[in-house]
């Protein structure tokens, strides 16, 4: 599984929705993610992908769509 | 000597306009004069904390020396090491002056001599700087810049609460002429809307209506329609007063080429309490979200303190909002205001989950949305009545 798939799995797990159909929809506006979901996302990224994202690094505007999240994770992996 | 409360009278705005003029001309020509900005900041600090308020001025200077040394010490330490104990110690030391200032009136009924207007807003900035430094996202600490960030005069007394890295981007940067002209336009708009909010609506509700209706409610002894009136009138006053002030602070920042984040976004339109906190005193609630709620949830989940994420979220909501209550002041009505909002967030989350599960059975239309806004508005106004301290006057004052 590549990064994209793993992230999408995590998101599906967290939101209960298949988000891969609309990769640019805003997860916060849609009510699929909130602060709690965010923290769960950060923890799962840490345990499943080994990327360490401190809470300070998390700026909502840069993490609000599936595409942006994948891009951020890839950047942190590089 | 004259002293001013920021944005309280026409003279203040007159001085402000003259003082800002060189900055505006400079930015229009693509130049930022940091030395002039510092001079003006200092000048306004003297206006706010000089003369009869000199004890506050001295308290501010002592506070700044203390906090800058503390953060400087911590960031220097953090470069080579990263122990949790030291981090926690630094945070405790950072909030210590604020704790003393908040506890003193509750203990002996007088104001602490180390207090000054805006101490809590400065403390937010200090604590977040320590936390971002702990997380390793803030690598370079510049003491002189840090002071400019703390005492940025448009927002010194009551926010909005900016962030170190965001403020730094604006501070180091000269906006393009096109962008700056738009900022000026927005700045003027904010300040004039602020006039309407603060000098017309807040005056109408707070100065003309509130004392009368409060008097009626006191005369009625107990539940009365006047008390219901106090609830709505006070809520309107609180919003227009604080939102008006925020518009002044933000508008002034725009003139200086700094895009201070907004504080209010039509809060009474909210459909639920969660949305309300995304629209009301936004920089405060986002600060609590980012630096208390999320970090506490992160810690509790990582160490698996509670089995279910739901429990974790609920417990943290209550803790988060209770701390916010204490921050407002150590009185029964502020603290219960905080707890009540914490409980409301828990109920709100439960309801949202319930609604999601039973989507097909629950109606959703314009009417239910209107009803949701109605309920939220009335709940919020009720908590503001509590917050106002009027119940305390009514029930306990003789």
Image (cartoon, coloured by chain):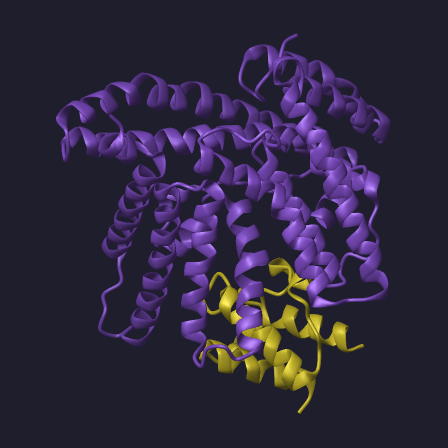
Chain colours: A yellow, B purple
Q: Quadrant of the C terminus of chain B?
A: top left
Residue drawn at 65 percent across, 68 percent down = A68
Q: Is residue B33 visible?
A: no
In the image, residue B89 sits, relative to residue B302, either above or below, namely above
Q: Quadrant of the N terminus of chain B?
A: top right
Residue B256, quarter of the rendered image: top right
In depth, the one of B228 and B70 nearer the eye is B70
Percent from the top left, x then y, of residue B11?
Answer: 60, 10
Residue drawn at 71 percent across, 14 percent down = B18
In depth, the one of B58 and B154 nearer the eye is B58
In depth, the one of B202 and B177 nearer the eye is B202
Residue B86, quarter of the rendered image: bottom right
In the image, residue B325 sits, relative to residue B213, either above or below, namely below
How many numbered markers are drawn? 0
Percent from the top left, x then y, of residue B188?
Answer: 60, 25
In the image, residue A44 sits, relative to residue B211, either above or below, namely below
Percent from the top left, x then y, of residue B89?
Answer: 68, 57
Does residue B20 appear left or right of residue A17 in this picture?
right
Residue drawn at 54 percent across, 75 percent down = A40
In the image, residue B18 sits, relative to residue B151, either above or below, namely above
Percent from the top left, x then y, of residue A1?
Answer: 66, 92
């Amino acid at each position: 599984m590549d990064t994209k798939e793993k992230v999408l799995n995590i998101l599906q797990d967290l939101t209960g929705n298949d988000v891969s159909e609309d990769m640019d929809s805003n997860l916060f506006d849609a009510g699929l993610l909130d602060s709690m979901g965010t923290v769960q996302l950060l923890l799962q990224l840490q345990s499943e992908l080994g990327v360490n994202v401190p809470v300070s690094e998390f700026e909502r505007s840069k993490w609000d769509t599936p595409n942006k999240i994948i891009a951020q994770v890839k950047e942190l992996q590089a | 000597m004259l002293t001013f409360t920021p944005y309280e009278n026409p003279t203040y705005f007159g001085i402000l306009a003259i003082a800002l003029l060189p900055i505006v001309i400079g930015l229009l020509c693509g130049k930022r004069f940091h030395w002039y900005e510092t001079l003006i900041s200092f000048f306004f600090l003297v206006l706010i904390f000089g003369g009869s308020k000199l004890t506050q001025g001295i308290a501010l200077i002592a506070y700044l020396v203390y906090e800058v040394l503390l953060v400087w010490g911590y960031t220097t330490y953090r470069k080579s090491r990263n122990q949790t104990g030291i981090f926690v110690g630094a945070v405790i030391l950072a909030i210590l002056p604020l704790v003393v200032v908040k506890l003193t009136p509750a203990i002996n009924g007088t104001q602490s001599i180390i207090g000054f207007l805006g101490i809590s807003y400065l403390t937010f900035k200090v604590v977040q700087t320590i936390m971002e430094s702990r997380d390793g996202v803030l690598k370079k600490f510049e003491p002189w810049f840090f002071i400019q960030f703390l005492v940025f005069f448009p927002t010194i007394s009551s926010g909005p609460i900016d962030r170190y890295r965001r403020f730094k981007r604006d501070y180091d940067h000269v906006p393009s002429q096109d962008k700056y002209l738009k900022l000026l336009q927005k700045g003027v708009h904010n300040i004039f809307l602020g006039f309407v909010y603060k000098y017309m609506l807040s005056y109408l509700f707070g100065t003309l209506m509130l004392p009368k209706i409060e008097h009626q409610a006191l005369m009625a002894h107990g539940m009365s329609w006047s008390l219901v009136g106090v609830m709505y009138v006070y809520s309107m006053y609180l919003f227009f007063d604080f939102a008006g002030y925020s518009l002044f602070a933000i508008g002034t920042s725009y003139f200086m080429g700094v895009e201070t984040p907004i504080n209010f976004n039509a809060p009474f339109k909210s459909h639920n309490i969660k949305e309300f906190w995304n629209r009301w005193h936004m920089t405060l609630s986002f600060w609590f979200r980012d630096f208390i709620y999320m970090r506490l949830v992160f810690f509790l989940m990582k160490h698996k303190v509670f089995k279910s994420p739901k429990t974790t979220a609920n417990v943290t909501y209550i803790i988060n909002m209770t701390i916010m209550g204490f921050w407002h002041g150590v009185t029964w009505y502020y603290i219960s205001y905080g707890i009540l909002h914490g409980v409301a967030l828990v109920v709100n989350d439960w309801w949202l989950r319930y609604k999601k599960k039973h989507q097909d059975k629950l109606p959703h239309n314009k009417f239910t949305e209107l009803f949701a806004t109605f309920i939220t508005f009335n709940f919020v106004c009720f908590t503001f009545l509590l917050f106002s301290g009027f119940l305390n006057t009514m029930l306990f004052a003789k």
